[in-house]
Image (cartoon, rainbow, N blue to C red):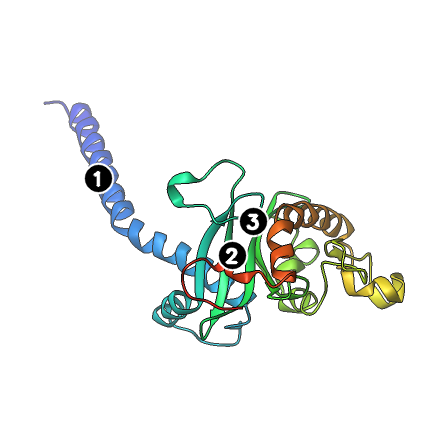
Amino acid sequence: MSSNLKSVLFAIVLCLACSLLLTMASSGLKGYQLRNINLDRQKNLLKSAGLIDDQSDNTPEYIEKLYSERIKSLWVDPSGRIVKETERGQKDLPIYLYIEKNVVEAYIVPINAQGLWGKINGYLAINKDGSTISGFTVYKHSETPGLGGEIERSWFQRNFEGKKIVNKEGKFVSISIARGAVKDVIQKDLQVNFVDGISGATLTGKFLSASMKDILKDYESVSVKFRHNMVKEIAGNNGAGN
């Protein structure tokens, strides 16, 4: 056998061996990767509900336990009616309930918004009054670091706490990101519906505001039920009260 042929055969065997090892490594790590993705989702849901924060050193086991005890995942139709898994349609919406001592304290809406450079994914928690935002988190985005990327920072996300998605007449208006500090650019009676913007990231704020309004409008039937103290219709048969 010529030296050239031996070299070719060696290269082929080496490539096959490397491919096999990479495949085995990928398969072996898949479960670990999926668990990490799920943990990140659960962590952000809990953060939006105010159950954990970035300063806490929470173990994966603690996050999973807290999530299973406090968060209930549901789907609702456009009218706010609970939909069984086997009956889900294209227009049905996912929603999460934060339950404390058998009482629904808030509901959490997934945010899948359009940013300047791509999708912005996060969660928005709304108090059981159906009007007041209790938390906001972002766990994935493509915005520019130091500019629009500031949406992932705690200082920006805390701006949402206590803000309203309804005006003083109780009508839905959503929540918007101002072009600057709210106190400087928004008249006083509207400030409750705005959060401070990010310097140099006007377009990120504009796109995120528009998307959040569309998303919250889709969930307005749920919000209305909470505003009218009809929580049991959303909570279902888990025994959670209002």
What label does residue 80 carry, if any? Answer: 3
Q: CA distance from mark 2 to mark 3?
A: 7 Å
Amino acid carrying label 3: it is Gly
Instruction: Kindly identify which residue carries mark 2.
Output: 234
Amino acid carrying label 1: it is Leu
Q: Earlier in the sequence, mark 2 or mark 1?
A: 1
Amino acid carrying label 2: it is Ile
Q: Is residue 125 above or below residue 221?
A: below
Name the residue located 53 percent from the left edge and 44 percent from the top edge.
77
Quadrant where the image shows the C terminus: bottom right
Quarter of the rendering containing residue 223? bottom right
Q: Secondary structure at mark 1?
A: helix
Q: Is residue 231 left or right of residue 160?
A: left
Q: Is residue 115 left or right of residue 87?
A: right
Asked if labels 3 and 1 touch by Cβ distance under 8 angstroms, the answer is no
Q: CA distance from mark 2 to mark 1?
A: 50 Å
Q: Earlier in the sequence, mark 1 or mark 3?
A: 1
Name the residue located 36 percent from the left edge and 69 percent from the top edge.
65
Q: Position of residue 125 (x, y in %)?
A: 59, 62
